[in-house]
Amino acid sequence: MPKKENKFIYNDWTYQLKNGNLDVEYPKNIEEPKSVYKYYPNTKYSIDALINKYLFCSHPYHLNDSLDSTSLLWDFSNLSKPLYLKFYYQYGLHKTFEVNYEKDKASGFASIKARFFEIVTKNAGIISLTTEPLQTLMWSHYSSEYGFMVELEWKQIKDNLKALNNDLNNYAFFPVNYVDELESIDFFGDSFNSPDIPYLYSVGVKRKDWSYENEWRLIPFSMDYGVPYSILGPYPDVLNKKERKLFYPKETIKSITLGKRFFNGSNLEEVIDEVTYKLKSEKKDDEYNDLDFINFLYENFNDRLYFCGEYENKKVFKRSAEKIHLEKIDDSTFKIIRENDGFYQR
Protein backbone atom coordinates (compact mmCIF):
# COMPACT_ATOMS: atom_id res chain seq x y z
CA MET A 1 0.00 0.00 0.00
CA PRO A 2 1.57 3.36 -1.04
CA LYS A 3 2.65 5.68 1.77
CA LYS A 4 0.50 8.80 2.14
CA GLU A 5 2.23 12.07 1.32
CA ASN A 6 0.49 14.19 3.95
CA LYS A 7 0.74 17.12 1.57
CA PHE A 8 -1.72 19.50 -0.08
CA ILE A 9 -0.76 22.06 -2.73
CA TYR A 10 -3.05 25.02 -3.32
CA ASN A 11 -2.38 28.30 -5.10
CA ASP A 12 1.43 27.72 -4.97
CA TRP A 13 1.27 27.09 -1.21
CA THR A 14 2.14 23.63 0.12
CA TYR A 15 0.60 22.46 3.41
CA GLN A 16 2.43 19.42 4.68
CA LEU A 17 3.89 17.28 7.42
CA LYS A 18 7.66 17.57 7.07
CA ASN A 19 9.93 15.50 9.32
CA GLY A 20 6.99 15.06 11.66
CA ASN A 21 6.31 18.81 11.89
CA LEU A 22 3.54 20.86 10.35
CA ASP A 23 4.97 23.10 7.67
CA VAL A 24 3.83 25.56 5.01
CA GLU A 25 5.92 26.27 1.93
CA TYR A 26 4.97 29.51 0.20
CA PRO A 27 6.14 31.24 -2.99
CA LYS A 28 9.85 32.12 -2.98
CA ASN A 29 9.18 35.78 -3.72
CA ILE A 30 7.71 36.12 -0.20
CA GLU A 31 10.46 36.64 2.38
CA GLU A 32 10.14 35.70 6.03
CA PRO A 33 9.86 39.00 7.95
CA LYS A 34 12.45 40.24 10.42
CA SER A 35 9.75 42.13 12.34
CA VAL A 36 6.06 41.42 12.79
CA TYR A 37 3.49 43.71 14.37
CA LYS A 38 0.58 43.11 16.71
CA TYR A 39 -2.24 45.65 17.05
CA TYR A 40 -4.04 45.88 20.39
CA PRO A 41 -7.18 47.64 21.63
CA ASN A 42 -6.79 49.50 24.90
CA THR A 43 -8.11 46.86 27.31
CA LYS A 44 -6.85 45.25 30.51
CA TYR A 45 -6.25 42.04 28.53
CA SER A 46 -4.02 43.85 26.01
CA ILE A 47 -2.04 45.55 28.76
CA ASP A 48 -1.69 42.25 30.62
CA ALA A 49 -0.37 40.57 27.45
CA LEU A 50 2.32 43.22 27.02
CA ILE A 51 3.33 43.42 30.69
CA ASN A 52 3.58 39.64 30.97
CA LYS A 53 5.08 39.22 27.49
CA TYR A 54 2.76 36.74 25.80
CA LEU A 55 0.70 36.39 22.65
CA PHE A 56 -2.86 35.13 23.03
CA CYS A 57 -3.47 31.89 21.14
CA SER A 58 -6.95 32.41 19.70
CA HIS A 59 -9.51 29.74 18.90
CA PRO A 60 -11.42 30.15 15.58
CA TYR A 61 -14.42 31.32 17.63
CA HIS A 62 -12.39 34.34 18.77
CA LEU A 63 -11.75 35.55 15.20
CA ASN A 64 -13.64 38.41 13.55
CA ASP A 65 -14.20 36.68 10.19
CA SER A 66 -16.74 33.87 10.49
CA LEU A 67 -15.19 32.10 7.49
CA ASP A 68 -11.71 32.25 8.97
CA SER A 69 -10.41 28.82 10.06
CA THR A 70 -13.89 27.34 9.72
CA SER A 71 -14.84 23.69 9.41
CA LEU A 72 -17.02 24.76 6.47
CA LEU A 73 -13.82 24.37 4.45
CA TRP A 74 -13.71 20.67 5.30
CA ASP A 75 -15.42 18.44 2.73
CA PHE A 76 -16.64 15.25 4.41
CA SER A 77 -18.56 13.90 1.40
CA ASN A 78 -16.10 11.02 0.88
CA LEU A 79 -16.39 9.76 4.46
CA SER A 80 -17.21 6.04 4.40
CA LYS A 81 -19.46 4.35 6.93
CA PRO A 82 -16.70 2.07 8.31
CA LEU A 83 -14.44 5.07 8.93
CA TYR A 84 -17.33 7.01 10.45
CA LEU A 85 -18.07 4.22 12.92
CA LYS A 86 -14.36 3.69 13.68
CA PHE A 87 -13.97 7.34 14.67
CA TYR A 88 -16.91 7.33 17.13
CA TYR A 89 -15.94 4.08 18.81
CA GLN A 90 -12.18 4.71 18.82
CA TYR A 91 -12.62 7.97 20.74
CA GLY A 92 -15.45 6.65 22.92
CA LEU A 93 -17.80 9.30 21.55
CA HIS A 94 -20.56 6.74 20.99
CA LYS A 95 -21.24 6.96 24.73
CA THR A 96 -22.16 10.65 24.47
CA PHE A 97 -23.31 11.34 20.91
CA GLU A 98 -25.76 9.71 18.54
CA VAL A 99 -24.06 7.45 16.00
CA ASN A 100 -26.16 7.49 12.83
CA TYR A 101 -24.24 7.51 9.55
CA GLU A 102 -27.23 8.00 7.24
CA LYS A 103 -28.74 10.80 9.32
CA ASP A 104 -25.41 12.61 9.65
CA LYS A 105 -24.68 12.22 5.92
CA ALA A 106 -28.02 13.83 5.09
CA SER A 107 -27.01 16.88 7.15
CA GLY A 108 -23.62 17.22 5.46
CA PHE A 109 -21.97 15.28 8.30
CA ALA A 110 -22.52 18.24 10.62
CA SER A 111 -22.32 16.14 13.79
CA ILE A 112 -19.08 14.29 13.15
CA LYS A 113 -17.51 17.42 11.65
CA ALA A 114 -18.24 19.24 14.92
CA ARG A 115 -16.55 16.44 16.85
CA PHE A 116 -13.44 16.62 14.65
CA PHE A 117 -13.39 20.42 14.93
CA GLU A 118 -13.42 20.24 18.71
CA ILE A 119 -10.67 17.62 18.88
CA VAL A 120 -8.37 19.60 16.56
CA THR A 121 -9.00 23.15 17.76
CA LYS A 122 -8.77 22.44 21.48
CA ASN A 123 -5.10 21.65 20.92
CA ALA A 124 -4.19 24.54 18.62
CA GLY A 125 -3.97 28.31 18.74
CA ILE A 126 -4.00 31.07 16.14
CA ILE A 127 -1.80 34.15 16.51
CA SER A 128 -2.42 36.85 13.90
CA LEU A 129 0.50 39.13 13.09
CA THR A 130 1.23 41.55 10.27
CA THR A 131 4.09 43.21 8.43
CA GLU A 132 2.08 46.48 8.15
CA PRO A 133 2.81 48.98 10.97
CA LEU A 134 0.99 51.94 9.42
CA GLN A 135 -2.14 50.39 7.95
CA THR A 136 -4.99 52.82 8.62
CA LEU A 137 -7.73 50.18 8.50
CA MET A 138 -5.88 47.98 10.95
CA TRP A 139 -5.36 50.88 13.35
CA SER A 140 -9.09 51.53 13.09
CA HIS A 141 -10.33 47.93 13.27
CA TYR A 142 -7.99 46.47 15.87
CA SER A 143 -7.05 49.38 18.10
CA SER A 144 -9.79 51.92 17.30
CA GLU A 145 -6.93 54.48 17.32
CA TYR A 146 -7.05 54.35 21.16
CA GLY A 147 -4.85 51.29 21.55
CA PHE A 148 -1.26 50.49 20.70
CA MET A 149 0.92 48.39 18.41
CA VAL A 150 3.91 46.24 19.32
CA GLU A 151 6.78 45.45 16.97
CA LEU A 152 8.25 41.99 17.60
CA GLU A 153 11.42 40.46 16.21
CA TRP A 154 10.46 37.11 14.73
CA LYS A 155 13.87 35.44 15.26
CA GLN A 156 13.72 36.23 18.99
CA ILE A 157 10.27 34.65 19.20
CA LYS A 158 11.38 31.57 17.25
CA ASP A 159 14.60 31.05 19.21
CA ASN A 160 12.75 31.11 22.55
CA LEU A 161 9.52 29.26 21.75
CA LYS A 162 10.46 25.93 23.27
CA ALA A 163 12.46 27.37 26.20
CA LEU A 164 9.63 29.64 27.39
CA ASN A 165 6.71 27.35 26.47
CA ASN A 166 7.47 23.89 27.82
CA ASP A 167 4.15 22.39 26.74
CA LEU A 168 4.52 23.47 23.10
CA ASN A 169 4.40 20.39 20.89
CA ASN A 170 4.83 22.02 17.50
CA TYR A 171 4.20 25.24 15.60
CA ALA A 172 3.93 26.64 12.09
CA PHE A 173 4.66 30.18 10.86
CA PHE A 174 3.57 31.33 7.42
CA PRO A 175 1.93 34.12 5.40
CA VAL A 176 -1.80 33.93 4.79
CA ASN A 177 -2.76 32.66 1.33
CA TYR A 178 -5.26 35.23 -0.04
CA VAL A 179 -7.64 33.79 -2.63
CA ASP A 180 -10.50 35.06 -4.80
CA GLU A 181 -12.89 32.39 -3.54
CA LEU A 182 -12.57 29.98 -0.65
CA GLU A 183 -12.64 26.32 -1.64
CA SER A 184 -13.14 23.28 0.53
CA ILE A 185 -10.57 20.56 1.01
CA ASP A 186 -11.34 16.83 0.87
CA PHE A 187 -10.86 15.97 4.55
CA PHE A 188 -10.45 12.28 3.75
CA GLY A 189 -8.29 12.73 0.67
CA ASP A 190 -5.90 10.01 -0.34
CA SER A 191 -2.89 12.10 0.69
CA PHE A 192 -3.85 12.52 4.37
CA ASN A 193 -3.81 10.16 7.31
CA SER A 194 -4.77 12.75 9.96
CA PRO A 195 -6.73 16.04 10.29
CA ASP A 196 -3.48 18.05 10.46
CA ILE A 197 -3.20 19.08 6.81
CA PRO A 198 -6.89 20.04 6.34
CA TYR A 199 -6.68 22.09 9.53
CA LEU A 200 -3.46 23.80 8.46
CA TYR A 201 -5.08 24.67 5.13
CA SER A 202 -8.23 26.05 6.77
CA VAL A 203 -6.24 28.40 9.05
CA GLY A 204 -3.98 29.44 6.17
CA VAL A 205 -6.43 30.76 3.55
CA LYS A 206 -8.53 33.92 3.57
CA ARG A 207 -10.45 35.85 0.96
CA LYS A 208 -8.65 38.69 -0.85
CA ASP A 209 -10.94 41.15 0.95
CA TRP A 210 -8.42 40.80 3.80
CA SER A 211 -5.22 41.08 1.76
CA TYR A 212 -4.50 44.62 2.98
CA GLU A 213 -3.55 43.06 6.32
CA ASN A 214 -0.50 41.20 4.93
CA GLU A 215 -1.03 38.72 7.72
CA TRP A 216 1.43 36.14 8.97
CA ARG A 217 0.15 33.40 11.23
CA LEU A 218 1.87 31.66 14.08
CA ILE A 219 0.03 28.42 14.88
CA PRO A 220 1.13 26.80 18.16
CA PHE A 221 0.05 23.26 19.02
CA SER A 222 -0.27 22.23 22.64
CA MET A 223 -2.52 19.92 24.62
CA ASP A 224 -5.82 21.10 26.05
CA TYR A 225 -6.18 24.80 25.25
CA GLY A 226 -9.94 24.17 25.51
CA VAL A 227 -12.83 25.34 23.32
CA PRO A 228 -14.75 28.58 24.15
CA TYR A 229 -18.26 27.42 23.20
CA SER A 230 -19.75 30.13 25.45
CA ILE A 231 -18.82 32.69 22.77
CA LEU A 232 -21.47 31.12 20.53
CA GLY A 233 -24.25 30.89 23.09
CA PRO A 234 -25.23 29.60 26.54
CA TYR A 235 -23.08 26.47 26.14
CA PRO A 236 -20.45 25.01 28.48
CA ASP A 237 -16.84 25.49 27.40
CA VAL A 238 -14.45 22.62 26.96
CA LEU A 239 -12.26 23.60 29.89
CA ASN A 240 -8.59 24.22 29.29
CA LYS A 241 -5.72 22.62 31.17
CA LYS A 242 -3.29 25.11 29.63
CA GLU A 243 -3.74 28.85 29.17
CA ARG A 244 -3.92 30.12 25.60
CA LYS A 245 -0.67 32.06 26.00
CA LEU A 246 2.61 31.90 24.11
CA PHE A 247 5.42 33.64 25.98
CA TYR A 248 8.36 35.57 24.54
CA PRO A 249 11.38 37.41 26.08
CA LYS A 250 11.50 41.15 26.65
CA GLU A 251 14.22 41.51 24.00
CA THR A 252 11.66 40.50 21.36
CA ILE A 253 9.94 43.90 21.65
CA LYS A 254 11.60 46.30 19.22
CA SER A 255 9.12 49.17 19.48
CA ILE A 256 5.73 50.16 20.91
CA THR A 257 3.54 52.70 19.12
CA LEU A 258 0.67 54.46 20.88
CA GLY A 259 -2.47 55.19 18.87
CA LYS A 260 -3.08 58.82 18.02
CA ARG A 261 -6.08 58.90 20.41
CA PHE A 262 -4.47 56.93 23.22
CA PHE A 263 -4.63 59.99 25.47
CA ASN A 264 -8.31 60.92 25.65
CA GLY A 265 -11.20 61.91 27.89
CA SER A 266 -11.50 58.48 29.48
CA ASN A 267 -7.98 58.40 30.92
CA LEU A 268 -6.98 62.05 31.36
CA GLU A 269 -7.63 64.06 34.49
CA GLU A 270 -6.06 67.22 33.08
CA VAL A 271 -4.44 68.45 29.87
CA ILE A 272 -1.69 70.74 31.13
CA ASP A 273 -0.53 71.65 27.64
CA GLU A 274 -0.56 69.98 24.22
CA VAL A 275 2.17 67.50 25.19
CA THR A 276 1.75 67.20 28.97
CA TYR A 277 -0.97 65.05 30.50
CA LYS A 278 -2.11 64.19 34.00
CA LEU A 279 -3.69 60.71 33.96
CA LYS A 280 -6.48 59.41 36.16
CA SER A 281 -5.28 57.12 38.92
CA GLU A 282 -8.50 55.37 39.96
CA LYS A 283 -9.14 51.81 38.85
CA LYS A 284 -11.63 49.02 39.45
CA ASP A 285 -10.59 46.07 41.61
CA ASP A 286 -7.20 44.72 40.46
CA GLU A 287 -7.48 45.87 36.85
CA TYR A 288 -4.70 47.71 35.10
CA ASN A 289 -5.45 51.28 34.17
CA ASP A 290 -3.77 53.55 31.62
CA LEU A 291 -1.62 55.17 34.29
CA ASP A 292 -0.21 51.73 35.18
CA PHE A 293 0.43 51.14 31.49
CA ILE A 294 2.21 54.46 30.90
CA ASN A 295 4.35 53.91 34.00
CA PHE A 296 5.24 50.46 32.68
CA LEU A 297 6.27 51.91 29.31
CA TYR A 298 8.25 54.66 31.01
CA GLU A 299 10.17 52.18 33.18
CA ASN A 300 10.75 49.49 30.55
CA PHE A 301 10.48 50.80 26.99
CA ASN A 302 11.09 54.53 27.08
CA ASP A 303 13.90 54.09 24.55
CA ARG A 304 11.66 52.52 21.90
CA LEU A 305 8.36 54.44 22.00
CA TYR A 306 6.52 55.95 19.04
CA PHE A 307 3.37 57.99 18.71
CA CYS A 308 1.04 57.41 15.77
CA GLY A 309 -0.31 60.32 13.77
CA GLU A 310 -0.86 61.74 10.33
CA TYR A 311 0.80 64.46 8.28
CA GLU A 312 0.03 66.37 5.09
CA ASN A 313 2.25 66.16 2.04
CA LYS A 314 1.15 68.15 -1.02
CA LYS A 315 -2.46 68.12 0.17
CA VAL A 316 -2.36 64.35 0.74
CA PHE A 317 -2.66 62.99 4.29
CA LYS A 318 -0.43 60.07 5.21
CA ARG A 319 -0.03 57.87 8.27
CA SER A 320 3.10 58.33 10.38
CA ALA A 321 4.73 57.32 13.64
CA GLU A 322 7.13 59.64 15.45
CA LYS A 323 9.82 58.58 17.90
CA ILE A 324 9.16 59.92 21.40
CA HIS A 325 10.16 59.38 24.98
CA LEU A 326 8.31 60.19 28.17
CA GLU A 327 9.39 62.65 30.84
CA LYS A 328 7.85 61.94 34.23
CA ILE A 329 6.72 65.11 36.00
CA ASP A 330 5.11 63.42 39.01
CA ASP A 331 3.38 60.11 39.83
CA SER A 332 0.56 60.70 37.34
CA THR A 333 1.84 63.42 35.00
CA PHE A 334 3.90 62.79 31.88
CA LYS A 335 5.29 64.95 29.12
CA ILE A 336 5.80 63.64 25.58
CA ILE A 337 9.24 64.58 24.23
CA ARG A 338 9.44 64.40 20.44
CA GLU A 339 12.61 63.01 18.89
CA ASN A 340 12.61 64.58 15.46
CA ASP A 341 15.25 62.21 14.10
CA GLY A 342 13.09 59.16 14.77
CA PHE A 343 10.20 58.92 12.33
CA TYR A 344 8.64 56.50 9.89
CA GLN A 345 5.79 57.13 7.51
CA ARG A 346 3.64 55.78 4.74
Image (cartoon, rainbow, N blue to C red):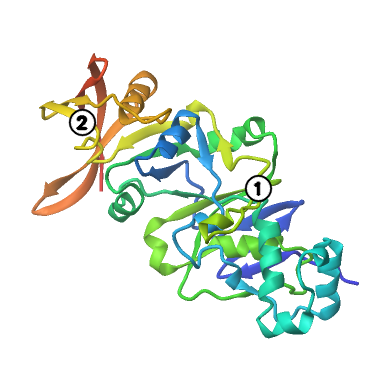
Determine the secondary structure under disc 2: strand
Of residues 299 and 131, the one drawn nearer to the viewer in this rendering: 299
Quarter-of-image position of residue 120: bottom right
Residue placed farthest to the top in the image? 330
Q: For the residue marked with disc 1, what is the amino acid? A: Leu
Residue drawn at x 38%, y 43% is 40
Look at the picture and state if 51 lies above or below 96: above
Q: Is residue 301 left or right of residue 89?
A: left
Of residues 104 and 16, the one drawn nearer to the viewer in this rendering: 104
> Can residue 337 be seen?
no
Q: Which residue is mark 2?
A: 268
Quarter-of-image position of residue 309: top left
Q: For the residue marked with disc 2, what is the amino acid? A: Leu
Q: Which mark is residue 239?
A: 1
Q: Position of residue 291 (x, y in %)?
A: 30, 26
Quarter-of-image position of residue 335: top left
- For the N terminus, the quadrant is bottom right
Whole-Å distance between the Cαs marked 1 and 2? 39 Å
Q: Position of residue 332 (x, y in %)?
A: 25, 20
- Looking at the rendered structure, the number of numbered marks drawn on it comes to 2
Determine the secondary structure under disc 1: loop
Look at the picture and state if 87 lies above or below 169: below
Q: Which of the marked residues, 1 or 2, is nearer the chain's N terminus?
A: 1
Q: Position of residue 143 (x, y in %)?
A: 33, 46
Image depth: mark 1 or mark 2 in front: 1
Look at the picture and state if 89 lies above or below 45: below
| Label 1 CA crowd tier, 10 Å (few <14, some 14–19, many 20+) | few
Q: Position of residue 70 (x, y in %)?
A: 57, 66
Of residues 33 and 81, the one drawn nearer to the viewer in this rendering: 81
> Can residue 310 be seen?
yes
